[in-house]
């Protein structure tokens, strides 16, 4: 009898770890792209790109970024962290009022590829809730912290009605490492192509930081894109102009 119980127990442990391995499995980019649940960049011939800002809103830098974007009539996407939204709600209001897109970047910004489904679900829900309370809208897009993704992370996001947005791998200047403004802008402008999703951060350093190379670099990037006839649109708008996803996903039609 004891042996029998032990056998069942061992079997259960095997089954449990098997399930975990399956869920933590990471597929190839092609497989994820084909599923329609994960987007790195879009396939389009139109000269449009999306600029994304992660980890904010930041009390100093986000308003500076919004000023630059307004000057060029550009619309960006802000992947905000719920805990920052709670602290700086008026900045989130301004982002929305100026026509930019707000997206979910979890509540506590936990960098962990082994995050459990229930923790991630709570992180997404808490962030959705605070964004919806302030802006009236629930975000449809989600970016995993650090871009970490596997089956469990993606499946959990899909069950929470989210589309997973990463970024064009050649459009990440790692601005959080604080390179110079010229290094950031050159990194972006030298390789930019239609349909790219550019990764920048509005939250750099601490809330008391006074200067951001990203803000200075953005001025140069925007001037380059403007001179080269690129339009800067939100990620949702970019997707609507591409062929990779059914347009019914957003229940709206492209503006043109
Ligand atoms: Zn982040």
Image (spheres, grey):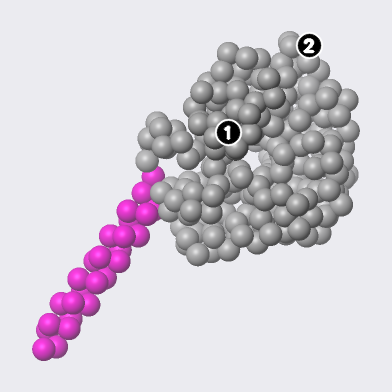
Q: Quadrant of the C terminus?
A: top right
What residue appears at the point 88 percent right and 33 percent down from the top-left corner? Answer: 67
Residue most extreme to the top: 228
Which residue is under mark 1? 167
Q: Nearer the viewer, residue 95 or 55?
A: 95
* Image position of 15 with respect to 147: above or below: below
How many numbered badges does the structure rendering display? 2
Q: Quadrant of the N terminus?
A: bottom left
**CA gap, disc 2 and disc 1:** 23 Å
Magenta segment: does it hold 19?
yes
- Name the quadrant containing residue 127: bottom right
Determine crowd level at label 2: few under 14, some 14-19, many 20+ residues with C-alpha closer than 10 A: few
* Element type at mark 1: loop
Which residue is under mark 2? 227
Q: Are marks 2 and 1 in contact (CB under 8 Å)?
A: no
Left or right of 242, for residue 222: right
Place of residue 25 in the rendered image (x, y in percent of width and height, measured from the top left): 36, 49
Place of residue 219 in the rendered image (x, y in percent of width and height, measured from the top left): 82, 25
Magenta segment: does it hold 231?
no
Residue most extreme to the bottom: 1
What residue appears at the point 71 percent right and 49 percent down from the top-left corner? Answer: 137
Of callouts 2 and 1, the N-terminal one? 1
Q: Which residues are magenta?
A: 1-26
* Image position of 81 with respect to 180: above or below: below
């Amino acid at each position: 009898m004891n042996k029998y119980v032990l056998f069942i127990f061992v079997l259960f442990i095997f089954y449990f770890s098997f399930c975990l391995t399956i869920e933590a499995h990471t597929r190839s980019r092609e497989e994820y792209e084909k599923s329609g649940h994960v987007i790195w960049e879009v396939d389009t011939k139109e000269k449009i790109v999306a600029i994304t800002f992660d980890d904010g809103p930041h009390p100093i830098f986000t308003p500076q970024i919004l000023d630059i974007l307004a000057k060029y009539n550009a619309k960006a996407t802000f992947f905000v962290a719920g805990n920052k939204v709670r602290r700086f709600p008026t900045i989130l209001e301004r982002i929305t009022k100026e026509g930019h897109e707000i997206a979910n970047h979890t509540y506590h910004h936990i960098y962990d590829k082994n995050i459990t489904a229930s923790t991630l679900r709570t992180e997404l829900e808490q962030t959705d809730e605070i964004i919806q309370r302030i802006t009236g809208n629930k975000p449809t897009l989600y970016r995993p912290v650090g871009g970490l993704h596997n089956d469990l992370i993606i499946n959990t996001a899909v069950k929470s009605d989210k589309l997973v947005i990463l970024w064009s791998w050649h459009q990440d200047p790692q601005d959080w490492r604080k390179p110079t403004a010229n290094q950031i802008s050159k990194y972006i402008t030298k390789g930019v192509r239609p349909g790219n999703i550019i990764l920048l951060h509005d939250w750099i350093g601490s809330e008391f930081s006074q200067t951001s190379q990203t803000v200075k670099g953005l001025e140069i990037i925007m001037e380059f894109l403007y001179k080269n006839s690129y339009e800067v649109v939100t990620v949702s708008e970019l997707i609507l102009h591409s062929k990779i996803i059914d347009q019914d996903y957003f229940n709206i039609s492209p503006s043109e």
